[in-house]
C-alpha cells in the first residue's frame, strides 16, 4: 500500500482543485437530494436558518432525514444520538480504510480532510488509490464540492422545493445507489473478492431483518473485512 | 431526556447531531492510529472497503421496488461493458424512471 507508492498521499492545491472538478457531476445530483431535504425540513416545521445550518454542520443526508422523523415539539436526545450514530457509523469504517494514506499527513491536515468525508468522495478516492493514483485530493476537493452542493440544495428546497413534482418517478432517488454500485463493479474483481462481497451482502441483509435498525452497514462491512483478514491473498 | 424545538433548542439539537457525526468521521482514523498496519490489516481494510458499499446496497436491492432493482441491474451491466461510471449511473436512473411509468 502506501509504503511502496509514496506519492499517493500527496495533497496539493492542484490535487484538491482536480478532485473538486471530478466530483461536480455527482454534486449536481446531490443538489437534488438537498432540495428533497430542504422541502422535507420545511414541511416538518424547521426554520430556514435551522435547516441550512443543519446541512452545513452535519452534512450527512440519511441521518438528517432520520432526524426529521424524530422531530416534534420536543426531540428525544438519546434516540436522536443513537440514530445519527448508527446511520453515520460507516464513516468510522471509511476513516479506517483511508488511514494507510492519511497517516502520511500531519495531524491537523489528516483530521481536516476527514471533515468532508462522505460516500461518493470516499468511494472515488479509494478507487483512485487502488489504481495507483493519488486520492486525497479527490477526497478533500470532491468533499468540498459535495458539501457546497448539499447546502445549496437544502436552501433551494426550502424556497423552491414545492415546484419539484415527485422526484422518485424520475428515478432520482436511485442516483447514489447506482453511483455506489458503479464503484463496486469498477473495483478489483476476482473470486475471492466476489465471495467476500457475497458474505458482506448476506450479513447485511440478516442484520437488516433481525438486528436493530441501521446496524446493517456496519455488520456487513465488518463481516467482509474479517473474512478478508482471515482468508488473505498470497503475498507477492 | 428531550429538548424543546422552540428557541435555542433547535440549535442545541443541531450541535448534538454535528458532534456525533464528527465523532464518526474522526473516530476511525483516530483508532487506526493505534493499530500497526501490517499485511493482515491491509487485507482487512481492502476487503472492508468494498464490503461497506455492498452492505449499503444489498437491502436497497431487496426492499426496493422493481424500478430500484432494474436501476441497479442496468448500472452493473453498463459498468461492466463500458467501465465508465457516468453512463452506468445514467442508465440506472433511466431504467428506474422507465419502470415507474407503468
Image (cartoon, coloured by chain):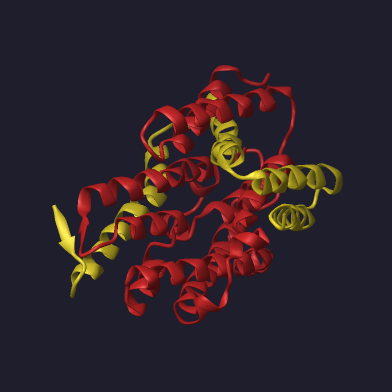
Chain colours: A red, B yellow
Q: Is residue A51 above or below residue A105?
A: below
Residue A131, by quadrant, is top right
Q: Nearer the viewer, residue A213 or A145?
A: A213
Q: Residue at x 37, y 43 (%)?
A: A86
Q: Is residue B29 above or below residue B16?
A: above
Q: In the displayed structure, does residue A72 sit left or right of residue A39?
A: left
Relative to A105, say whether A161 is above or below. below
| Relative side of B17 to A128, left or right | left
* Spot occupied by residue A47 in the image (x, y as percentages of width and height): 32, 77
Kindly identify the residue that appears in the image at 67 percent across and 41 percent down.
A184
- Name of the residue lying farthest toward the front: B102
* Location of residue A235 in the rendering, given as x and y in whole percent from the top left corner: 67, 21
Query: If the image is split into quadrants, where does the C terminus of chain A sit?
Result: top right
Quarter-of-image position of residue B17 = bottom left
Answer above or below: position of A162 versus A204. below
Give the number of callouts: 0
In the rendering, at what x and y percent does residue A233 appear?
66, 21
Horizontal placement of B18 versus B4: left or right? right
The N terminus of chain A sits in image quarter = top right
> From where the camera sits, is residue A75 visible?
yes
Q: Quadrant of residue A166?
A: bottom right
Find the residue positioned furthest to the left: B1
Amino acid at each position: 500500500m502506501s509504503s511502496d507508492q509514496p506519492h499517493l498521499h500527496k495533497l496539493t492545491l492542484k490535487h484538491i482543485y482536480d478532485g473538486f472538478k471530478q466530483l461536480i457531476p455527482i454534486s449536481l445530483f446531490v443538489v437534488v437530494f438537498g432540495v428533497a431535504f430542504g422541502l422535507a425540513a420545511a414541511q416538518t416545521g424547521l426554520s430556514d436558518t435551522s435547516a441550512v445550518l443543519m446541512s452545513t454542520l452535519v452534512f450527512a443526508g440519511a441521518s438528517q432525514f432520520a432526524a426529521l422523523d424524530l422531530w416534534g415539539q420536543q426531540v428525544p436526545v438519546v434516540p436522536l444520538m443513537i440514530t445519527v450514530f448508527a446511520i453515520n457509523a460507516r464513516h468510522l469504517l471509511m476513516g479506517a480504510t483511508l488511514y494507510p494514506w492519511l497517516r502520511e499527513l500531519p495531524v491537523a491536515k489528516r483530521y481536516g480532510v476527514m471533515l468532508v468525508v462522505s460516500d461518493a468522495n470516499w468511494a472515488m478516492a479509494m478507487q483512485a488509490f487502488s489504481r495507483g493514483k493519488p486520492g486525497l485530493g479527490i477526497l478533500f476537493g470532491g468533499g468540498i464540492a459535495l458539501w457546497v452542493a448539499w447546502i445549496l440544495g437544502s436552501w433551494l428546497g426550502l424556497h423552491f422545493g414545492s415546484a419539484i413534482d415527485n422526484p422518485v418517478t424520475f428515478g432520482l432517488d436511485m442516483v447514489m445507489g447506482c453511483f455506489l454500485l458503479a464503484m463496486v463493479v469498477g473495483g478489483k474483481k476476482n473470486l475471492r473478492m466476489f465471495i467476500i462481497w457475497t458474505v458482506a451482502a448476506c450479513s447485511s441483509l440478516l442484520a437488516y431483518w433481525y438486528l436493530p435498525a441501521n446496524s446493517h452497514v456496519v455488520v456487513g462491512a465488518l463481516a467482509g473485512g474479517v473474512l478478508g483478514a482471515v482468508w488473505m491473498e498470497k503475498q507477492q | 431526556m428531550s429538548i424543546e424545538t422552540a428557541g435555542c433548542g433547535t440549535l442545541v439539537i443541531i450541535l448534538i447531531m454535528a458532534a456525533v457525526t464528527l465523532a464518526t468521521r474522526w473516530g476511525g482514523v483516530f483508532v487506526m492510529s493505534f493499530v500497526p498496519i501490517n499485511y493482515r490489516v491491509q487485507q482487512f481494510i481492502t476487503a472492508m472497503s468494498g464490503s461497506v458499499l455492498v452492505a449499503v446496497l444489498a437491502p436497497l436491492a431487496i426492499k426496493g421496488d422493481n424500478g430500484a432493482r432494474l436501476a441497479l441491474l442496468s448500472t452493473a451491466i453498463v459498468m461492466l461493458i463500458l467501465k465508465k461510471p457516468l453512463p452506468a449511473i445514467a442508465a440506472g436512473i433511466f431504467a428506474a424512471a422507465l419502470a415507474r411509468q407503468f
